[in-house]
Amino acid sequence: MYDTIGIWVGALFTLAIYSFLYKENPVYRLAEHLVVGISMGYIIVLIYNTVILPKLLEPIFGGNHWLLIIPGLLGLLYITRFIPSIAWLSRYPIAFVMGTGMGIGFPLTMKAYVLRQLEAAVIPLYSSGMPWHEVLGNIVMIFGTLAALIYFFFSKPHKGLFFGTGSKIGIWVIMLGFGATFGFTVMGRISLLIGRIQYLMGDWLHIIE
Amino acid sequence: MGAVNIWEKMLNLDRRWIFLGIGIISIVFFLVGFGMPVTTTKEVENIFDFVNELGPDDAIFIGFDFAPGTQAENMPMAVAVLRHAFHNNIPVFMTAIVPLGQGMAVSALNYVTDPAIDGHYERVLFEDWADYREAGITNREDIIAAWERDGNVLPEGALGWVFEGRDYALLGYLPLFHLVILGMTNSIETQFPVDYHGNPIGEMPMLKEHKSLRDVDLAVTNAASGACTYWITYAREKIGLPIAFGVTGVMATDYYPYIQSGQIIGQMGGLRGAAEYEVLLQENGITATTDKAFRGMDVQSAEHIFIILLIVIGNIAYFAGGFHKKTRLKGRG
């Protein structure tokens, strides 16, 4: 019974959202506002039940872990942003999160995003027994990376063989990247539509499996 | 002049006609169902092969790191990996980086264990086999033997039993998940003392064998945001945990460099990636049929042809109408 009601609600709200494709209308706006409101309500309750209650309130009042009052109070300082006269207090929890985040994340982030990627770009163009398509891939990868980097080097005018031609090739490489991203984006958007059509025709109308 | 007007009309076509065309194609191709083949790629095969090598002594994490907005893309890939893990009796930890991902994990589990679906796995809740744990029976084979000895019969159409706490643990969502991953490199239980249902994690046999991420063999994050890279930064780089990505189509190109650098073992990109995994499951006899992602690929292919045609026609109109010589199109301020 509840499942059926849920499916009907889901189907009608899907149609309400898609009605925007024709033109904006009150039904669409109602659905849009409900999505935002319900999502926020759900997240607040979820965070209360999964974080605030079991990790703060219960240990303090049930387990006598009084030290937790300190991070609790620090967290409450975020709310001072809504009171202009003491809004500056909100900088303390922000500074704490930023500081610990940087301290914990910086070495690993450098390793993951910079050093590993550099390492992956330092590869032989050719070694014995390497299939031709791999050689070609390595050449494209290395020279493509260099050309794209040249394009983003702004301290020299993009003229001459090295900077001029290099940056032009770099633009092509970047455009190819954008093209691939656009293709995937089209696929992604169509996939979302497919998901909704499957829901409407399958779960709701039972026309398809 | 007349010809130019046609080109102008084509270029200024009301976009609602395009939406209508896409809608009609979607419905028609779902109804007809051509079953166009889906070839598999190395990126997806690598994930499949890796999971296929694992067994009951190993464990994997499946991250439901997406909200309902991208359910169409992320859910089929998460479901496919979950099915694969259950088939190979690999213990699965289910987590969520985003709050709404927790509900997605519940939905995926409900779908894979739905008795109405042929080829489901029969779920046994944590409290239902408490007597066996108290009797010291924690080995999977022994649990099944004792469970069936007590008169429980595997329903027709079910592929096997899955015991909560032995075969899977629904850990759920926690905020600041990068710190949670970091904490789990030392102990999973300190981060998740209880699971989504409130069951104590420490009493779960799978937790006793896999106390931290160091005892885990793979993390597959099905994500709709860059948060999936937390797994690389805080698990891969810190303790060398193998990572696989299941990402939305929009994100897919951003993460290919991580395959080339060897930081992830593979990637499922969008609905296509999920369909590939479903094909691999079927080809290897793990599932009898493919699932929703594969069925959607007919529509996907047809839509792509339609969009390519529109781009070609648009370009013909643009050049044939001589608009490349003008600074702007007529009728567009």
Image (cartoon, rainbow, N blue to C red):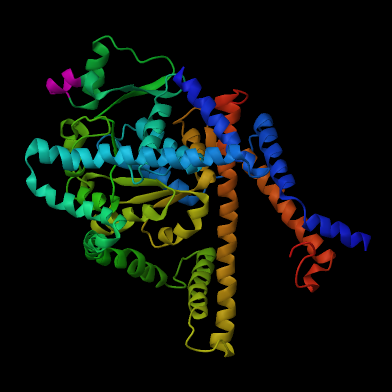
Query: Residue B222, image x and y in percent?
Result: 41, 45
Asked if residue B331 lies left or right of residue A90, the reply is right
Farthest front residue?
A: A85
Farthest right residue?
A: B2
Residue displayed at 27% across by 53% down: A79
Asked if residue B269 lies left or right of residue B192, the reply is right
Closer to us: B76 or B55 = B76
The quadrant the C terminus of chain A occupies is top right
Report the magenta stretch's main SS.
helix
Residue displayed at 73% across by 65% down: B333
> From what the image shows, is residue B117 above or below residue B257?
above
Residue displayed at 22% across by 59% down: A93
The answer to whether one can see residue B118 in this image is no
> From what the image shows, is residue B258 above or below residue A38?
below
Query: Residue A6, image x and y in percent?
Result: 48, 25
Query: Residue B149, image x and y in percent?
Result: 24, 11
The answer to whether one can see residue B216 in this image is yes
> From what the image shows, is residue A145 above or below residue B124?
below
Q: How many marks?
A: 0
- Reply yes or no: does residue B134 show up in magenta: yes
> From what the image shows, is residue B194 above or below residue B153?
below
Asked if residue B66 lies left or right of residue A202, the reply is left
Residue displayed at 55% across by 76% down: A170
Closer to us: A15 or B88 = A15
Stretch in magenta: B130-137
- Reply yes or no: does residue A63 show up in magenta: no
Q: Which image quadrant for residue B121?
A: top left
